[in-house]
Image (cartoon, rainbow, N blue to C red):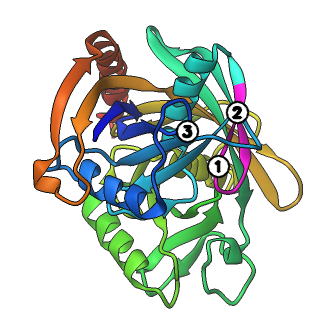
Amino acid sequence: MELEFLKCHGSGNDFIIIDEWSKDYAFSETERVELAKQLSRRNAVIGSDGILFVLPSSKAHAAMRMFNSDGSEAEMCGNGLRCVARYVLEIAGKDKLTIETMKANLEVARVPDVYEGVQSFEVAIEPVSFETDTLPLKNESRDLISQPIPQLHQSLRFTALSVPNPHLVALVEDINDEMLEEIGNKANANKDILPNGTNVSFVKDLGEGSIFVRTFERGVGLTNACGTAMSASTVVSCVLGNQNLDEVITVLNPGGMVQTKVFKKDESTYAVKLRGNATYEFSGIVDLHLNKEENTQLLEIIEFEEEQALYQQMADFANKKTIKL
């Protein structure tokens, strides 16, 4: 079959959008898993961090489901939600609406550009919880805030939270990719501690309302950016006193930068507003053969060259700040 798709990214975290909402596609659960594996692998016909399926919803304007390149489904994806937000908002001709996700119906909106010329969108990230059973994390207490996990590392202090997908966050003096990858692999292999695995982030505080975040993403590995990880990292930074609630925090990462703001909803839960780019890379048509991957091939591509160039300017600006690390 001929399948239309859109390639996009949020903070360098890249996705394939497949529209089962406004187009005449209806894939089964098995087919969605196979599509993610076949189209998202880096040596595959397109290549991405995962697929965003846009679906009809009885609870919101549309629904989003995100499948990683290994075929696993993520509870939430902040960078992906911004991409879906743009896609649905443009088709609906609106500036604000609601998207259904696995755990919650979330508000999304078009907002002023975070960098000149880079189309930007704000999405709600919630519910945020520190209760370990929401990850789940097998632990003696109900929460784990700035505590060691000896099975992962002897000295680093982790904070566990769900946003609503699972995250471990460690505040560090220096970002060490090799150590992060080692810990990320351990965390996702040790089902006795983390039955569903987790995302793991190292966070370096930059002062003046800024942090740098590097993430090992569950089902992906080291990634340029992860929206929920950046959200989780800002929440932890606020809870541990390095950053302030209700204030804009600039989050730098290898993929660029976003802005976040953390709100306390009650004694135990928080919410985050995540603002950043949703950049289109190219649209196209693929001749899809689900049962014969070797026959799947690209038929057409239309590049969004100006958008990519403008985003690269923003990424270069962010990297100039990051290089001082």
Q: Which residue is mark 3?
A: 81
Identity, as a three-letter code, of the amino acid under mark 1: Thr
Q: Nearer the viewer, mark 1 or mark 3?
A: 1
Pick out the residue farthest to the left.
294
Q: Position of residue 249 (x, y in %)?
A: 61, 34
Q: Which residue is mark 1?
A: 101
Q: Residues within 10 Å of mark 2 (few under 14, many from 20)?
A: some
Asked if residue 135 lies left or right of residue 171, the reply is right
Q: Position of residue 170 (x, y in %)?
A: 50, 63
Range of magenta residues: 97-107
Q: Say if mark 1 contacts mark 3, CB within 8 Å.
A: yes
Q: CA distance from mark 3 to mark 2?
A: 13 Å
Q: Say if mark 2 contacts mark 1, CB within 8 Å.
A: no
Identity, as a three-letter code, of the amino acid under mark 3: Leu
- Between residue 70 and residue 217, name the one nearer to us: 70
* Earlier residue among tags 3 and 2: 2
Identity, as a three-letter code, of the amino acid under mark 2: His
Quick one: SS at disc 2?
loop
Residue 106 seen from this side = yes
Quick one: SS at disc 3?
helix
Residue 171 seen from this side = no
Asked if residue 27 lies left or right of residue 235, the reply is left
- Between residue 309 and residue 261, name the one nearer to us: 309
Kindly identify which numbered label has been placed on residue 61: 2
Q: CA distance from mark 2 to mark 1?
A: 11 Å
